[in-house]
Image (tube, rainbow, N blue to C red):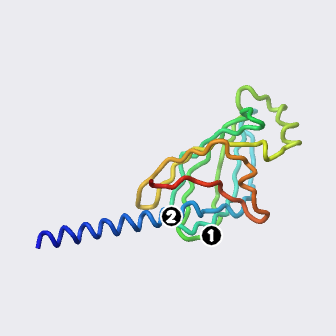
Amino acid sequence: MADSKGRTWLFIVLLAALSLIQSCSGIKDVRIVSCGVESVSLRGLRSVVANVMLGVDNPSVGMTLSDVRGTVRIGGDEVGTFTVDPVTLNRRSREEYPVTGVFTLSPSVQPLQLVPLLRNADLSKVTTDISLKVKIKGGASRRFSLEDVPLSSFFSGSDSLQMPDLPPLFL
């Protein structure tokens, strides 16, 4: 009788683990489908605060993206760093979410140096390093780091923004 209970619990644990792995595999299918700037304001001479509405298609589980930060480079030269407030994505939804981020110029960059860079902006030369924590609702969390992601990879489709390939979540 005790052996039967042990097998039942083992089966339940294996089934739960398989379900978790299967649901987490869909995280790489999350897509940014729109991005609209709501407001931009200066914070001193070196920082900008932006509020955007981010349209996200999430065919996966609910999750929270937090501790989002990164570095922006143009032609390999660091231009600045950014942080983004936490965002919670609802499961199996296609919704718009308000997102607030702060971009701060690197100490080596003068604000007027950006004008020609932005005027002649070639998205293929703009890259970013991104670090973020993903927490599955009611489950585990994991930190991701993506390096030298071309900004142009977010704009690969004409009607939607694409996420770069993410590593498997819980391997």
Residue at position x 74%, y 34% from top?
76
What secondary structure is marked by label 1? strand
Which quadrant holds residue 31? bottom right
What secondary structure is marked by label 2? loop
Q: How far apart are marks 1 and 2 (CA)?
A: 12 Å
Determine whether, in the image, residue 88 is placed left or right of residue 164: left
Q: Quadrant of the N terminus?
A: bottom left
Classify 113 as above or below 165. above
Determine whether, in the image, residue 67 is placed left or right of residue 107: left
In the rendering, at what x and y percent does residue 90 appear?
54, 66
Residue with the mark numbered 2: 62
Residue at position x 59%, y 64% from top?
29
For the residue carrying disc 2, how many other residues have a C-alpha within 10 Å: few (<14), some (14-19), or many (20+)? Answer: some
Classify 38 as above or below 116. below
Residue at position x 77%, y 66% from top?
159
Q: Which of 101 and 162 is in front in this view?
A: 162
In the rendering, at what x and y percent does residue 14 appear?
32, 66
Determine whether, in the image, residue 75 is placed left or right of residue 87: right
Q: Nearer the viewer, residue 44 or 31?
A: 31
Point out which mark residue 94 bears: 1
In the rendering, at what x and y percent does residue 134 appear?
51, 53
Residue, far top: 108
Which quadrant holds residue 130? top right
Kind of residue at disc 1: Arg
State if disc 2 and disc 1 touch (CB < 8 Å). Answer: no
Residue, far left: 1
Kind of residue at disc 2: Gly
Determine whether, in the image, residue 135 is placed left or right of residue 34: left
In the rendering, at what x and y percent does residue 84 appear?
61, 47
Q: Nearer the viewer, residue 67 or 29?
A: 29
Give the mark nearest the N terminus, 1 or 2: 2
